[in-house]
Image (tube, rainbow, N blue to C red):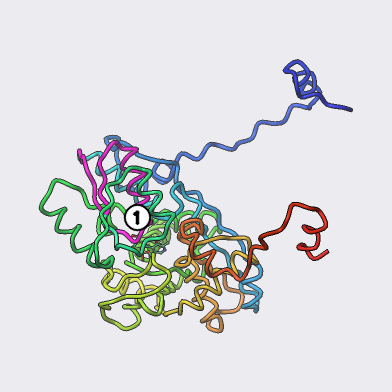
Amino acid sequence: MKVDYLTPQAAQTQFLEVPTLPPTNCQPWPGLIETYRPYLPVSEATPIITLLEGNTPLIEVPRISQQIGRGVKVLVKYDGLNPTGSFKDRGMTMAISKAAENGAKAVICASTGNTSAAAAAYAKRGNMQVFVIIPDGYVALGKLAQALLYGAEVIAIEGNFDDALTIVQEMAEKYPITLVNSINPYRLEGQKTAAFEVVDCLGNAPDWLCIPVGNAGNISAYWMGFCQYHSLGKCDHLPKMMGFQAAGSAPFISGKPIGSPETLATAIRIGNPANWDKAWAVKKASLGEFNAVTDQEILEAYRLLASQEGIFCEPASAASVAGLLKVKDQVPSEATVVCVLTGNGLKDPDCAINYSNNQIKSGIKPQLPLVAEAMGF
Ligand code: F0G
């Protein structure tokens, strides 16, 4: 039958013929604080500042599983699908909600980019002023664009993230301004919900969790989440926590802070992680490991995820998959492995364009034979 959708009457007639569908039980996702309220330090007095973050997909990556073989199943927790494009939104909904509860008018953070984007979005939604201190020239374009448009006061210093973090800590001590870096305990409380989601989805904890490590807040937060769920009986074991750093910025591998960290994965270009002791405790308690991956290995995983699995993450995030592939022989047969993809690939378009193996075929005249020829026909 020919369908005329152009008039409301016609559309109505058409819909009358559609059998009534059963109602779905799909509830709208209320954001992670409402979802996990009993496990978070909030009360009725906490104004919840949310952009409905969390509930990100856990996606199987069969090509990567195949590269490992032996029945190993690999999934990625794609946290780049959060409202500002990174896992930082999980921590920021908590940190900003608690700041609002405590009457804060302004917040501050040091950032390699993602924290500043998340802080800016949530602070503005909570009607606060937000200052972000970033290392000049080392923040990816998408993240800068976000901080500016959300309305943060962006201050670029001639130093690295570690210098910026030292400054914001002093600022927060001296002035009436709340620090929202991961030293703020509410940040990790929010971020631990990613572990809850992984367990809720798998029905148990994974055997391994692979995660990029910079300031080491997220690895600590995931561990908190797994331990809390384990103590509630929601999983019957705990994962081995595998932390991966960029080789040029790998203080956990050298065992001491690094003065001049370098890597193209600018999100994790950090030499003196604030959560140093926590991260070592996680490694020990989970029988985990820290390993380094080179920028080359990061780029290979970055391209592999996009071109074979259809998943575009930022370079720092690809460190988790690069790391897994590097130590793949250590993965037990039949294991379930979750790799955390912390940020969206659109955050760093320069990296994608500069390091994709692909090229634009340009300069083609708008004529069918020429387009067909360029297509290889
Ligand atoms: N992946 C991405 C995309 C990040 O932005 C970060 C940290 C990490 C991994 C590392 O997480 O610090 O908890 O170990 N970015 C911070 C920022 C430093 O300022 O956005 P971590």
| Quarter of the image where ligand 1 sits | bottom left
- Mark 1 vs ligand 1: CB below 8 Å: yes
On the image, numbered disc 1 is attached to which residue?
A: 115
Bounds of the magenta segment:
103-132
Tell which of 136 and 294 is nearer to you.
Answer: 136
Residue extending farthest top: 9
Q: Residue furthest left?
A: 174
Quadrant position of residue 75: bottom right
Spot occupied by residue 4 in the image (x, y as percentages of width and height): 81, 24
Outermost residue on the right side: it is 1
Q: Is residue 142 left or right of residue 355?
A: left
Tell me where residue 157 appears, x and y as whole percent: 24, 61
* Residue 289 or residue 41, whichever sits in front: 289
Task: Determine the secondary structure under disc 1.
Answer: helix
From where the camera sits, is residue 236 visible? Answer: no
Residue at screen point 29% across, 63% down: 135
Residue 79: image location, x then y, percent? 48, 56
Residue sitting at x 12%, y 49%: 175
Image position of 261 with respect to 342: above or below: below
Task: Report whether residue 100 is seen.
Answer: yes
Task: Give residue 257's quadrant in the image.
Answer: bottom left
| Magenta-span inclusion, residue 108 | yes
Tell me the residue at 44%/56% (across/down).
194
Query: Which is more toward the observer, 180 or 306?
Result: 306
The verdict on residue 175 being magenta is no
Look at 55% across and 63% down and name the residue there: 76
Residue type for callout 1: Thr
As displayed, is residue 116 above or below residue 263?
above
Q: Position of residue 64 (x, y in %)?
A: 62, 71
Which quadrant holds the N terminus?
top right
Mark 1 Cα shell of 10 Å, populated few (<14), some (14-19), many (≥20) = many
